[in-house]
Amino acid sequence: MTVTARRKPAPPWAALAVVAAALLVLPFAMSEIGTTWVRVTNLALLYVMLALGLNIVVGFAGLLDLGYIAFYAVGAYTYALLASPHFGLHLPFWVILPIGAAIAALFGVLLGAPTLKLRGDYLAIVTLGFGEIIRIFLNNLSRPINITNGPQGVWGIDPFRIDGLNFSVKQTILGLSFSGPIKYYYLLVVFVAAVIALTLRLQNSRIGRAWEAIREDEVAARAMGINTTNLKLLAYAMGATFGGVAGGVFSAIQGFISPESFVLVESIMVVSMVVLGGMGNVWGVVLGAILLSFVPEILRFSVGPMQQSLFGRMLIDPEVIRMLLYGFALVLVMLFRPAGLLPSAVRKRELAERSE
Amino acid sequence: MDIFIQQLINGLTLGAVYAVVALGYTMVYGIIQLINFAHGEVVMIGAMVAFTVINALAPFGLPPLLVVLIGTACAIPVCILVGYTMERLAYRPLRHAPRLAPLITAIGVSIILQHLAMLVWSRNVLAFPQIIDTRLYNIAGATITNVQITIIVTCVAMMAALALLVYRTRLGTAMRATAQNPHVAGLMGIDIDRVIAATFAIGAGLAAVAGVMVGTYYGIAQYTMGSILGLKAFAAAVLGGIGNVPGAMLGGVLMGLVEALGAGYIGTYTDLCKISGISEWLTQRCAADGGHFVLFGSNYQDVFAFVVLILVLVFRPSGILGERVGDRA
């Protein structure tokens, strides 16, 4: 291989500039249609963060985690408890987000440590059980000492505030009117961009290559001198960290959280996004998350009224369509395009060759 | 009333149902090493179909046992059809794919079944009509109902029948041969596809009956009932040793007992008022709460199955009766 062939191609600056400009204008275009769509976009961006976090565990290290939403829950509850009237604490978000991320990472290690030796499919079930355990605890830790306020959840959670900039109200800055969701949108775009940059760098790093080796063949990886224990724990911790940060932002945006938001189905939704997009491919995962966040919402706004006008009542609950979409995404992708919509090169090779 | 004996009876009833569901997981896993994630949903569909039929027949004043039997008889073919269809469409094409692929499909199938059921039966809870007059019998200071006795007897009979099928018939021999080595079994003239389809069908049939029983026991059925029940049964199968038929039965019963006794006693053992002398604050709390400061009450019942699952997988992944399975990842 020649040296020139190894050199990375220069980043396509022009394309990046166009994307950045589009991302800047997007929320204003969206709010022309309705503020709801800005909220939908924000939620989609949160799912992108979650899916990218899960992608580290599932896509990079090859550990199927079906309880990922637990870390989201940990982050969300950390934020909610430290910035709400529930305990009377009102810490600023830049203090809480790192705490939430750290606690989530700790939970990641807690989950990872006992499950290190497990095979793929067993691991999936144990992680699922872990997710359920967290949810059951959130539901019940209102007695004897009220920590989580049980099924009623925590409300009155503080929005993000930076000096005079309050993310919950409409403010005019430089002659432009920024509504709350639009401000969160920009914040989320920055977060997502940071997460994308981080995961891309991770993938090509020493750690990323080690994860890939573990995914391909753990025994061989260990034989090559990779510390599989630490690296698997690191994958859990990293994935959990992203989940924790996303959870904190979710808490602040919603202003109210309850255990209802962190059920098993949510974990499976995030898994569907990763699988649909292409496990291990960062851009694929972003695409998967965006598709599976927006398509159900578009359906909700089109199919619902359409049924009303055609039949005079709702025949099919949009929520059902949403879930069926996730289910079929999982089944059909696995049957017909197992490496996802945008397959990662390695994964594609692996899924094609491993058939007996 | 003796709480220990009472929880033992409740645990046995629940455990018998878990065992029947666990058999479905373990047979499929034994043969194609797939965690059939959607098995719990088959149980749910069995319960929903049976409840629909039972509710339709309830006003006619037929004997309750006959009504339930007709309901079950309708549920079994539906479940077998569902089980066969999902094997044919979702799992068979992926039989030689890497292991996580069919597991992911199975999760998808589970979501699809659950929400199709929601389309058919809506979100509402189906209630079991008041047709059975529950009779109570006293055993050693505890009570057992005629429903519980029926459930336990039916489960034992089904498990015996299954054991006969697996160990005494040609189909059973073919199933065990396929489980040992599908390639060689194929060379010996066994139609592997048929054996696998039959395994799914049998498991689904058992699931249908289990669905009816669990629905009758609790008196309600809903489209969400399958997932948690399925997980507990899966945990039971792992506890007994996955892939092992007697193991699933043992695991199921043990899981039921752990859950019932756990839920019965956890409150008593985590009541900090027994040691309230150690701190002034605790003494005050106890006095204010009527002498109780329970850390974990019976509302943590659902946690036990998962804790057992994690403990088994960490300390004895092959389960109680299971043989060591290879580390094929």
Image (spheres, rainbow, N blue to C red):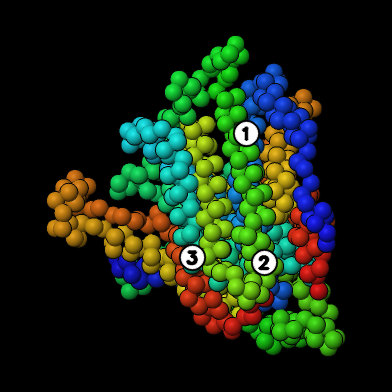
> Looking at the picture, which amino acid does disc 2 mark?
Ala
Q: Residue at x 49, y 39 (%)?
A: A248
Nearer to the camera, B123 or A15 = A15
* Residue occupied by mark 1: A189
x and y percentages locating residue B199 in the rendered image:
72, 73
Determine if marks 1 and 2 fall on one subunit. yes
Callout 3: chain: A
Callout 2: chain: A
- Separation (CA) of disc 3 from disc 2: 20 Å
Q: Residue at x 24, y 57 (%)?
A: B272
Q: State if disc 2 and disc 3 touch (CB < 8 Å).
A: no
* Residue occupied by mark 2: A213
> Looking at the picture, which amino acid does disc 1 mark?
Val
Q: Circle 2: is it few (<14), some (14-19), or many (20+) Cα within 10 Å?
A: many
| Numbered disc 3: secondary structure | helix
* Residue occupied by mark 3: A113
Residue A304 sits in quarter: top right
x and y percentages locating residue A316 in the rendered image:
72, 37
Side (left or right) of A238 relative to A55:
left
Q: Is residue B284 above or below residue B138?
A: above
